[in-house]
Amino acid sequence: MTQTALRLSGIDKRFGPVHANRSIDLSVAKGSIHGIVGENGAGKSTLMSIVYGYYQADSGTIEVDGKRVTIASPQDAIAAGIGMVHQHFMLVENFTVLENVLLGAEGGALLAKGEAAARAELARLARDYGLDVDLDAKIEDLHVGAQQRVEILKALYRGARILILDEPTAVLTPQEADKLFELLALWRSQGSTVLLITHKLREIMAITDRVTVMRQGAIVATRETKDTSQAELAELMVGRRVATRVPKSAAAPGAEILRVEHLSCIDERGAARLQDISFSVRAGEIVGIAGVSGNGQTEILETLAGLRAVASGRILYKGEALPPPGTPARAKFARSVAIAHVPEDRHRMGMVVGFDAYETAILGYHDDDALRRGPLLSESRSIERCRDLMGQFDVRPADPRLRSGQFSGGNQQKIVLGREIDRDPDLLLVGQPTRGVDIGAIEFIHKRIVEMRDRGKAILLVSCELDEILALADRILVVCGGRIIGEADGAAADEKRLGLMMAGIAA
Amino acid sequence: MSSRGDMPAWADYVLLPLINLLLAFVLSGLVVLAIGEDPVRAMRILVEGAIGYPEAIAFTLYYATNFIFTGLAVALAFHAGLFNIGGEGQAYVAGLGVALICLYLDFLPWPIIFVGAIALGMAFGAAWAAVPGWLQAKRGSHVVITTIMFNFIAAALMTYLLSNVMLEPGRGAPETRRFIASATLPSMQTMLGWIGIEAPRSPLNFAFFMAIAAAFLVYVYIWRTRWGYALRVVGQNEQAARYAGIDPAKTIIVAMAISGALAGLMGVNEIMGAHQRLLVAFTGGFGFVGIAVALMGRNHPLGVCLAALLFGALYQGGAELAFEMRAISREMVVVIQGLIILFCGALENMFRPWIATLFARHKAA
Amino acid sequence: MDDFVQLVSLLASTVRLSIPLILCALAGLFAERAGVVDIGLEGKMLAAAFAAGTVAALSGSAWIGLIAAIIVAVVFSMIHAFACITHRGNQVVSGMALNVLAVGLTAVLAFAWFREGGQTPALSGAARFAPIVLPFADTIGQVPILGPIYARLISGHNALVYLTVAIIPIVSFVIFKTRFGLRLRAVGENPHAVDTAGISVAWLRYRALICTGVLCGVAGSYLATAMASAFQREMTAGRGFLALAALIFGKWMPVPAVLACLLFAFADALQGRLQGVALPIVGVVPVQAIQALPYLLTVLLLAGFVGKAVAPKASGIPYAKEK
């Protein structure tokens, strides 16, 4: 009945130990908008990078318009009529729009001829699709929405018939997103095909014809959009995992430890990352922040830990205002008043991969008097502390002299978590405590966090795993777009409702 | 980086550098062949000229002293993630610091001159490196380019001072008068004389012991103090440093200053020890040798000392070689040096995958 | 009138001194615009100078010497490419290695082959690029003002000077008006964009470094067979680094970099004439102050105290797909 524009069969891809794509079979109908949803790390972007030739699959085949094609490089993909708009734009920032469009499709050794042709063609595309951009403007002077239009123009200019868009609306305002969808619909009506990667269910429902759900590198379901619902998709995305819930009694919250008032923060590009965030954490409770990653969780953790400057707002700790964050001295100060921080990304921040384990185990506490012998940093005491920590947290192998990067993810995380918990902080800021951690270690880590709570400590937990939030949090805050858009009681929380809130639908 | 786990540590720290070193020597041998000489004989003369008799050993150690200082300077900065190629200029300016005390305050008692000249030399070297450090930390200008520029600025400054201000009239070359005896470092000959050992005359002096001490102190600083800890965190992961409450900017400036002070000690060896006067271009490219020494020595003080000895032997043996084999000039040593930087530095990873595969296969078997 | 003739001859020597700087700076431009830091310009130029001096002496032809110089410089450049692109080695270390290697190798080989204390035999006749007197230089030279300018500033240079004058607009054209130039500029800013556009990052950078080698080859040849009449030890005397400074000073743009080279060359030409001459207000300016000026200006520029020089964003970073 309908033709198939793209068919993937048995696509498999590993990055070292990570199985990013597991024998993916997918067929996309010509003239349709096909959505691909899944949580972060579900393997969507890897799959699309394979289709675009940026990565090569370990095995599997790709067919375009019923013909088997070999896509060994983006050049092959472009030749096969595939275009891609990456999540992080592949634009040369100090080039003009025209130069960016021409790059790789110059139409001859000299630019002048190609330029003239390109201007004419781009004018036509702009007219037909409403994609007007000043061709002579520099990319760095354009706002993100316009930059995205350049990416789309690039693909269209190269004659793409299949367009892959990776999280296209992440950077757009709702109005811009609507405009983009109008464009995609128009494009579909002309018989072209769109693959839309997103984790925003509202968009899937609004624009796609079919939707495929991915989880942990595999496809878990494909549905006709009209036959499904956001609730069903949310459930499919999150999945029912093996219950690893640790036993947990009801919380007995005590005094207020942390109070955040009207916190706002903007990034280097001037975009708002946090908007008017207010909440509090009391002693003896775990407050979980749920949300799709990139919605302000990182910023909340990092401002509280002192690493990121704020635009406005106050942070009160035990009733007193903390000095303004954003300086190394402030990060140090936080530790000195018993605030501990387990960062979301241990490789980027929480550890030094090239250091021996015992050195990572004192990161941030290297000024500690107990580790000092005279003016020197005592190696034996550091090792002793690390060995102690490895015993307590069941780190394997329990070898303080092993390079930090050589431990498995779970054991690395135990070292980082152990280091922070070991100091018996009054407030623990913990991000993604079990990312890339095996099941056994997850349970262990969860247990330690609950234990801390039971000892009357205040804990702020950030996790993109809803399951984890549900397992640990006594109170749940849901963030979306840098705002807290909902709150729920941990014990009575409803997963579907949270899923909808995470997707930006206040319920 | 991640491939480090593919092979045992000894392969990484010993086997790989040795293979690269061997390759550098084989190619140097080919150069010798190309000019129609016998590489084996050349090698024999070189070794004999470097360690064959007491005077040769003294010269080897004298050169090694310079290379330990400049090698340590490069290595320490490297641990902070910085590439200080300005050792040449830092040592040059440090020579001025030394000379200021030794020339104009030489009426002071010997211990004060001794401490003061070394301290001022180190301070000058430190300042000459701290400025590029500050420019990198605060203004984002790359330390590699600024240290290169500072080398040239130092050369111009020193030439000016030597030929216009500090020059002793009547000399052929732009240089100062000789320091008085109490404003110099005791030579090895003198020191051994104190304990009744007769030694040949050579430029080897007290600075040699300072070099050994410096290597030890650098080791302690990098691996046994919290400042060194902070320095290494900044060098490996600046984000983690911020997380740990370490100020990367401050750490970078301090690291460059210490690096410059170490390079400055080379000025002490040359000016206060060997030449006992300040002269134009006394650094003679030794600052650049420090790069080769640090690369070969894997940025570890012990490795730096061993590599410095090797280069000391090369410089001394090379001089002998040029004397014995008329077709070979002194610069043969520079060829070897260049090849070592190429293979132990820029191409250090060429054999890595190959050896890693070998070990993996061995493991599987 | 005498002052005017003085000025013309000052400008003429500025031109002569600027040639190796301009060639080297343009050579560096290709490498750095492609995202490969090249502090080895000095070494490549030195090796080329030696090749030119040697081959010109042996063949008796400056042009054959030029070809040899280009080949040697390209080989050096390919070593840099092999280390930095293929093996993702440290670009600064590699450049340094080539500089050191060039100093050693040229001295050793010159010493061994010619036994003249490290220089190549003196060149004369066709083995050198001789000054070319343009038509009617004598006649027009008599005309006031324009005469000396034509006869002494425009006429009377060697072929490589005119070649360089031609190369400047060509380089500018290649960089800004051709497909290769577009891709080259892109790969130095965002190699990922180039890769996703279906262009090989490595091959593009290799080609850029070939261009670097060619231009360094001409520069080296100019030193040994046009400006001087033999290769001499370390005859580049820091010009490669000065060119690098000019490149930065010109913000990695061809024409501004050339102007920076002319400025630095002018300072160089001037210093000889200013020796001991007291100027109004400032008095006697030490030669060394003029020598240090280019480097000082470059540092100030890099630090953002005088304008701001922003290097190509991807320079110095080996390209790896996985971010």
Image (spheres, coloured by chain):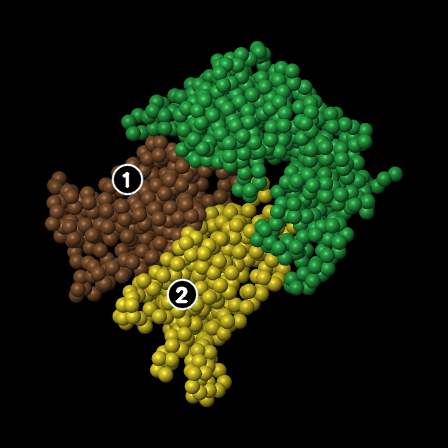
Chain colours: A green, B brown, C yellow
Q: Chain of mark 1?
A: B
Q: Which mark is residue C264?
A: 2
Residue at point 54% right, 54% down?
C34
A92 displayed left or right of A206: left
In contact (CB < 8 Å): disc 2 and disc 1: no
Amino acid beneath label 2: Phe
**Residue B15 visible here:** no
Q: Mark 2 Cα within 10 Å, few/some/many (few <14, many 20+)?
A: many
Asked if both marks, 2 and 1, belong to the same chain, the answer given is: no
Residue C297, how many percent across, how many down? Answer: 39, 58
Q: Quadrant of residue C242?
A: bottom left
Amino acid beneath label 1: Ala
Count the labels in the image: 2
Residue at point 38% right, 54% down?
B148
Q: Chain of mark 2?
A: C
Residue at point 20% right, 55% down?
B277
B176 displayed left or right of C63: left
Q: Which mark is residue C253?
A: none
Q: Nearer the viewer, residue B11 or A234?
A: A234
Q: Nearer the viewer, residue C314 or B273?
A: C314
Q: Secondary structure at mark 2?
A: helix
Residue at point 62% right, 55% down?
A137
Q: Which mark is residue B214?
A: 1
Residue C186, how many percent across, how many down? Answer: 58, 53
